[in-house]
Each structure stands twice: as structure tokens, then as C-alpha cells.
Amino acid sequence: MRALAAHGVEVSHGDVRALAGVDLVVGERESIALIGRSGSGKTTLLHVLAGLVTPSAGAVELDATTSLVFQGANLLPHFTALENVLFAERDGADSERLLALVGLEAKRDHLPRELSGGEAQRVAIARSLAQQPAVLLCDEPTGHLDTDTSARVLDLIEALRAGLGFSLVIATHDPDVAARCERLVALHDGVIVEESTR
Ligand SMILES: Nc1ncnc2c1ncn2[C@@H]1O[C@H](COP(=O)(O)OP(=O)(O)OP(=O)(O)O)[C@@H](O)[C@H]1O
Ligand SMILES: [Mg+2]
């Protein structure tokens, strides 16, 4: 079963063609690493899949809800860790349980500036999961973290995926991150140039 499909997606920023005809099917419970050098279109594609950017041509068929974890954690600075998660909560989600799942029960009343980078990223993951997405989109979720912390964040995402069963699309420059995914999709100048399955 598929969770979402992009067909012939094109996005232009002025005269820059960020995506030049992308076809991608994301299966239920599948994990995909989106790789490619800086400027190849990874973030743009994630934003299209998240519904934040409307393609100028082509379409995205969503059979499921998606939620995006931004490259920086992008938390609301004046609200606590728990409040940041609560704002995203959909009926039936339990923000306190999600904060506990990401190991931050004790930091629930901390403001983002009182959290480390890895902790803020974990709050951002809890916030995305509070939307109960069928597809979790992550934009270099470990880009700003040291090796140990990034391994812990990735272990966490994997454990949550095993438990909750969402699909994962993760943009990354890190070969260790890519190696954990079931499928690899490589972008170059806004088109998919290589796909492989492990
Ligand atoms: N808001 C914007 N205005 C103009 N050009 C943009 C905008 N956003 C992205 N671009 C351009 O679109 C192309 C794709 O950018 P995108 O952010 O998707 O790349 P990326 O693969 O995520 O890169 P990185 O690995 O550096 O995050 C680049 O050429 C970029 O300069
Ligand atoms: Mg990017």
C-alpha cells in the first residue's frame, strides 16, 4: 500500500528550477533517504510533500497525513517544550506520553533556549508525531548534532517508527543516516538521478 505519490512535480523559485519533474511513491511503513548535494532540491521536495509548497506543475496525491520536522527544530521560543507539542496535538494524541517517548518528561516545562540542540530536535519530533502523521518527513534532523546525539535521535526515530508504524522520508548528507533507510533516492538539479533499495 502506498502512503503518498508525487507525479511530475515541478517547482520554480523565480528562474531557479528547484524541482524539474519528480515522481516518487512512498509506501506505507517504508523508510526513504533523500540524498543529493546542497541545492539539489531535497528541502523543496519535502516541503511539497508536506503541502507547504504548491508545485507549479504535477501533483501530489496524499493518501495519508504528513508532518515535517524542520532542519532547525523551529520551536516556538516563548512556549515550553510541552506547550510546543500540545499546539500540534490532534484528537487522540497524547503530548505528555510523546514527550516521555522522546525522553524529555523532565524537561517539559523548559523553554527552547533552555534545551540542548538534540533535546530541541527531540521536542520537534514529538511535535510532529502529535499530528499523528502516516508519513514523517525529516529535513536533516541530525544536521546540527554531534555524532553520539545524532545516533540517539536516529535510534529514537527508528524505535518510534517500529512502534507507531509511520513511513519516513529523511533528507540527509550523512551516509550513516542514509544507510539506515530501506530505500535511497538521489536528487541532482531537481530530478531523481538514482534509486536503490537495500
Ligand atoms: N525561497 C527560495 N527562493 C529562491 N531560490 C530558492 C528558494 N528556496 C530554494 N531555492 C533554490 O532552489 C534550489 C533547491 O533548494 P533546496 O533548498 O531544495 O536544496 P537542498 O537539496 O535542500 O539543499 P541543502 O542540502 O543545502 O539543504 C537551490 O538552487 C536553491 O538555491
Ligand atoms: Mg535542504
Image (cartoon, rainbow, N blue to C red):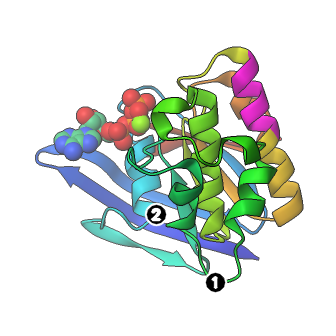
Q: Amino acid type of disc 1?
A: Asp
Residue 28 visible? The answer is yes
Residue 72: percent from left, percent from top: 45, 36
| Camera-nearest residue between 51 and 192 | 51
Residue 5: percent from left, percent from top: 56, 70
Magenta run includes residue 153: yes
Q: Secondary structure at mark 2?
A: loop
Residue drawn at x 51%, y 56% is 84
Residue 142: percent from left, percent from top: 61, 30
Task: Decide if ligand 2 comes within 8 Å of the CB at mark 1.
Answer: no
First of labels 1, 2 by sequence position: 2
Q: Amino acid type of disc 2?
A: Ala
Question: What residue is pinned by disc 2?
Answer: 50
Of the numbered discs in the image, which one, if any, rests on residue 91?
1
Task: Using residue 12 as the reference point, say whether residue 162 is left or right of it.
Answer: right
Magenta run includes residue 168: no
Give the quadrant of ligand 1.
top left
Cα distance in 3D space between marks 1 and 2? 20 Å
Dot 1: few (<14), some (14–19), or many (≥20) neighbours within 10 Å? few
Residue drawn at x 40%, y 73% is 59
Q: Quadrant of the C terminus?
A: top right
**Magenta residues (range):** 148-155
- Report which quarter residue 103 is drawn in: top right
Q: Quadrant of the N terminus?
A: bottom right
